[in-house]
């Protein structure tokens, strides 16, 4: 069940589908202020039109999958802002509807052209980790404290997952999952709630060898391999220089399609709360690396923090040989 829609898209895209890029980066470029605990999800309240505009920019750049703006949108987070529960759930649905509207409008305009060069994109509803909600750096360390259990994590994610799935996205994207316990909780939750929307689980890694928590990819992939609800596995929000090695590792341990959408390579300084520029390590450009990732075995490739529509345009061109975007 889970993989059909994904396999079809990957095939249409010529063997590798393109995921969109950084959301917050682009919202800021359009003038949004996201210095907020809700991060880019704050725009769901204040400037939903900008969110749709970012989706359209990534579609124009050649993205085959666009990810909703709900990464940091949680019901407790919205309630803490003084919203009612109905309003919080409405904003979660809005995050998916804005992406679906952008996709449908873009596809209609594409069909009017004599030689369409785009695929009909899929919309993935983003689900950030428990650490992303805490916004205390634990999404980067994977350390949630001794009192957090699989059951507590399931309860944290349950209602958001139900609401997002009810908005009818094509996929559910669990993003930047930093530890094995949360992977276990998500796999169990998908079964318990009998979620019919296919999902992906992407981990985050700071060293290219382990999850942020220090746990092994192998143990997590074993959990995911046993789930028919998870169609895709991968990594995101990870330094790009580690990605090729991670794909090789995943290829040994799973038969599921692999998605990779790393950061630009700039480094976030959590204390100073700013991005440190990429040092000149003679690193290859993102699109050249993307081609390597495709050759190594990734089926879906895009960007995370600090990547932009121009990054994704270059990736799309590199992977599909497109010109003129």
Image (cartoon, rainbow, N blue to C red):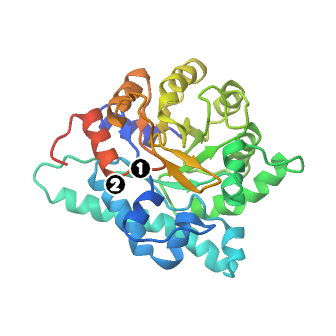
- Whether residue 293 appears in this view of the structure is yes
Residue at coordinates 56% horizontally, 24% vertically from top-left?
250
Q: Residue furthest top?
A: 252
Q: Nearer the viewer, residue 115 or 149?
A: 149
Residue at coordinates 19% horizontally, 57% vertically from top-left?
111
Q: Nearer the viewer, residue 151 or 2?
A: 151
Q: Which mark is residue 321?
A: none
Q: Nearer the viewer, residue 5 or 313?
A: 313
Q: Are marks 2 and 1 in contact (CB under 8 Å)?
A: yes
Q: Is residue 12 above or below residue 192?
A: above
Q: Is residue 262 above or below residue 193?
A: above
- Whether residue 120 appears in this view of the structure is no
Question: Quick one: label 2 or label 1, which is nearer the N terminus?
Answer: 1
Q: Residue furthest left?
A: 114
**Quarter-of-image position of residue 30:** bottom left
Q: Position of residue 315 (x, y in %)?
A: 32, 39
**Quarter-of-image position of residue 32:** bottom left
Q: Is residue 3 above or below residue 68?
A: above
Q: Position of residue 110 (x, y in %)?
A: 21, 57
Secondary structure at badge 1 equals: loop
Q: Position of residue 117 (x, y in %)?
A: 20, 46
Q: Which residue is mark 2?
A: 58
**Left or right relative to 314: residue 97:** right
Q: Position of residue 107 (x, y in %)?
A: 27, 58
Secondary structure at badge 2 equals: helix
Q: Is residue 98 above or below residue 218?
A: below
**Left or right relative to 111: residue 188:** right
Q: Residues within 10 Å of mark 1 (few under 14, many from 20)?
A: many
Q: Which residue is mark 1?
A: 21
Residue at coordinates 57% horizontally, 17% vertically from top-left?
252
Q: Residues within 10 Å of mark 2 (few under 14, many from 20)?
A: many
Total numbered labels = 2
């Amino acid at each position: 069940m889970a993989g059909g829609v994904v396999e079809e898209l990957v095939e249409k895209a010529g063997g590798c589908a393109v995921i969109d890029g950084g959301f917050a980066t682009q919202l800021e470029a359009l003038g949004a202020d996201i210095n907020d605990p809700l991060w880019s999800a704050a725009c769901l309240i204040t400037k939903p039109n900008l969110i749709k505009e970012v989706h359209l920019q990534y579609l124009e750049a050649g993205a085959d999958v666009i990810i909703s703006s709900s990464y940091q949108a949680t019901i407790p987070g919205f309630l803490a802002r003084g919203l009612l529960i109905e309003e919080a759930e409405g904003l979660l649905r809005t995050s998916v509807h804005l992406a679906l509207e952008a996709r449908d409008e873009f596809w209609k305009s594409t069909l009017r052209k004599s030689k369409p060069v785009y695929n009909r994109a899929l919309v993935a509803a983003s689900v950030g980790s428990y650490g992303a909600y805490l916004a205390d750096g634990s999404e980067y360390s994977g350390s949630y404290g001794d009192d957090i259990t699989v059951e507590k994590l399931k309860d944290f994610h349950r209602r958001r997952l139900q609401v997002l799935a009810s908005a009818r996205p094509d996929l559910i994207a669990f993003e930047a999952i930093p530890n094995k316990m949360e992977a276990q909780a998500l796999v169990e939750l998908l079964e318990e709630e009998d979620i019919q929307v296919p999902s992906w689980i992407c981990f985050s890694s700071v060293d290219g060898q382990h999850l942020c928590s220090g746990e092994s990819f192998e143990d997590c992939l074993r959990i995911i391999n046993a789930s028919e609800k998870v169609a895709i596995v991968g990594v995101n929000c990870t330094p790009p220089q580690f990605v090729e090695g991670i794909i090789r590792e995943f290829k040994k341990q799973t038969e599921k399609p692999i998605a990779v959408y790393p950061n630009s390579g700039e480094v976030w300084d959590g204390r100073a709360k700013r991005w440190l520029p990429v040092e000149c390590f003679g690193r290859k450009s993102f699109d050249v690396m993307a081609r390597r990732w495709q050759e190594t075995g990734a089926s879906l490739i895009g960007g995370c923090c600090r990547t932009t529509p121009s990054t994704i345009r270059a990736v799309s061109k590199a992977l599909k040989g497109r010109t003129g975007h």
